[in-house]
Image (cartoon, grey):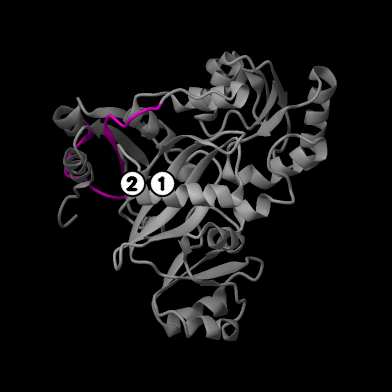
Amino acid sequence: MNFVFFSPHFPQNSTEFCYHLHEQGATVLGIGDVEYAHLEDKLTTSLTEYYKVGDLENYDEILRAVGYFTHKYGKIDRFESLNEYWLEQDASIRTDFNIYGTKTDFVYNLKQKSKMKEFFHKSGVSTVQFSTGTTRTDIDPFLQTVDFPLVVKPDLGSGASMTYKINNEEELNGFFATKPADVAFIIEEFIDGIILTYDGLVDINGNVRFATSHRFEQSVMDVVNNDDHLFYFCLKYVSPEVEQAGKSILKAFDIRERFFHIELFKSNKDGRIIALEVNMRPPGAWMTDAINYTHDIDIYKEWASMIVNNEVGGPYDGKYYTGYASRKNHKTYTYSHEDILAAFGANIVHFNVIEEVFSRASGNSAYQFRAEDLDKIRQIVRYIQQEEQGV
């Protein structure tokens, strides 16, 4: 298999995907914008060849790089970045070189939130009511069916950037008076609930080969807008309601041979599972590593084995709950790093500084920790994120 990995140096865990592709016998060809000498050793030993471009946004440069690899190594079997930001460019390259995977005729169904809703309806899973009206008067019919608060977000985009809660008519009018003219927004009903995810691997035949679930009890929108710290949990199990909804959504999208990360609300009002959005890539914010710590596996290896050989091990039962708790530099915390290690060193499996581009949502630094009991995980979160009073 000739596998072109786009931007293999960023984010950092891309190295793990390249390493395990190489271990499974693939010819791994990298395209990036940093000097070869600056790549970490584990990545350089995983790449058969590396092609440096001046600008990852320059499509002509990427075309030339793939053309060069095709001339030297033969047909390219896969082109992938595993990164939400590059989904459209990945699809364009696959289309131009007839490479297996999502093409340009489908990619916006995976990127554009309003288009996702059609597939949620097809799946039979409830979804969030929405409007794509571009003016205040356009959304009058929508306002007759929902109450405040509302949520506005870019129709095309990932994460919680430019995502806001609208509490009343005055704020809504203010949004329409000041919103950027070059960004298409979607307006949704606000759901009071938690987010449960359905994450895993689906093979080339459309079969789910591995699945797990994360639980977010905070609004990531609020975390970003309030510059707050974040916490979440990787669960030992996938609840039957999440599994049923997740599999139905995968079938509706007809997604194959990919990681998947599906976000679902569980309503606090009536307990319904409500589809929010899909991300056909690995989950972010250290969640792939949380999967490893929860199930005692190497999900990078399992993904590479599925891609190269259509083989996945398991089944892998959850052995632990894995927590994530970040800190923000502008906050003053009660306990020091040394205090945390002294109190919970046996549970902590990872600590690191977060790359600046991800820090608004994910924190400036973060801890991962695991325990067999969820109450223990919650205790560790409270300890890490306890703030000094009156500071």
Residue 164 placement, left or right of 374: right
Contact between marks 1 and 2 (CB within 8 A): the answer is yes
Can residue 40 be seen? no
Q: Is residue 360 above or below residue 267?
A: above
The count of marks equals 2
Residue 330 covered by magenta stretch: yes
Q: Residue at x 55, y 19 (%)?
A: 19
The numbered disc on residue 239 is 2
> Which residues make up the magenta segment?
315-337
Residue in the foreground of this view, choosing between 167 and 240: 240
**Residue 228 sits above or below residue 70 on the image:** below
Is residue 129 positioned above or below 77 on the image? below
Q: Main secondary structure of the magenta part?
A: loop
Q: Say left or right for 322 vs 163.
A: left
Give residue 132's position: percent from left, percent from top.
Answer: 59, 72
Give the class, few, some or many, for how many residues have Cα within 10 Å of label 1's Cα (few <14, many ≥20).
Answer: some
Front-most of residues 174 and 213: 213
Three-letter amino acid code at disc 1?
Glu
**Location of residue 260 with respect to 10 vertically, above or below:** below
| Spatial CA span between label 1 and label 2 | 6 Å
| Amino acid of disc 2 | Ser
Q: Position of residue 302 (x, y in %)?
A: 49, 25
Disc 2 element: loop
The residue carrying mark 1 is 243
Mark 1 secondary-structure assignment:
helix
